[in-house]
Image (tube, helix red, strand yellow):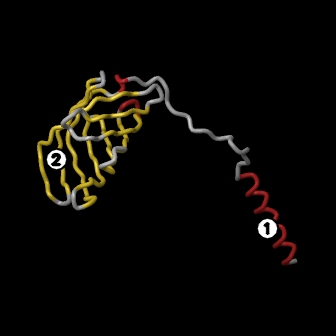
Amino acid sequence: MKASLRMLVILGLSAAVLVLVPISKPGAFAVRASSGCTNANLSGSYGLAFSGFQRQHQGSVAFYGGGLAIADGGGNFAATFADSVNGVSSTNNAYTATYTVNADCTLSINATPGSGGDNFVGVIVNGGGEILATDISANDTLNLDLKRQ
């Protein structure tokens, strides 16, 4: 009797697993990006935060900060931020860049001369409410998060 009950429980659990676990074909799932984005999707005032590492003479050091950024919807970007580089803080740092938004809502932000050599790539989320990006330039390893105010 115990063996029969055990067998029924095993069969019942097996059936439940088969019903609850979806069976999919390889390649059935695909990443689909948003579409229809333009430079205008990156427009307005944003709070910004970044963190990572910056290459200095002594090697890579911790680099993080936050501030305020403004995007004009036409490809121009400006920010003022405070930062800490290896524990040494500074404030009122100015940064300017240009940006390009692709139709799939990915983007690139490139520093203008004099603002450093940053080249960020990322994605616009929530209709322009947030931008997630990472610096792909050789000197830095930074992540950037912008949130519309």
Mark 2: amino acid: Ala
Return the disc, 1 or 2, that comes first in the chain's sequence.
1
Q: Which quadrant, please, contains the N terminus?
A: bottom right
SS of the residue under disc 2: strand
Label 1 to label 2, Cα distance in Å?
63 Å
Q: Is residue 79 visible?
A: no
- At x 37% / y 44%, what residue is drawn? 136
The image quadrant that residue 5 belongs to is: bottom right
Q: Residue at the bottom extreme?
A: 2
Taking the image as shown, residue 31 lies to the left or right of residue 80, namely right
Q: Within 10 Å of the Cα at label 1, are there few (<14), some (14-19), or many (20+) other Cα atoms?
A: few
Residue 73 vs residue 63, the one in the foreground: 63
Residue 139 vs residue 127, the one in the foreground: 139
Q: Which residue is mark 2?
A: 82
**Figure check: 51 above or below 130:** below
Q: Are marks 1 and 2 in contact (CB under 8 Å)?
A: no
The image quadrant that residue 72 belongs to is: top left
Q: Position of residue 145 (x, y in %)?
A: 32, 43
As drawn, the label of residue 9 is: 1
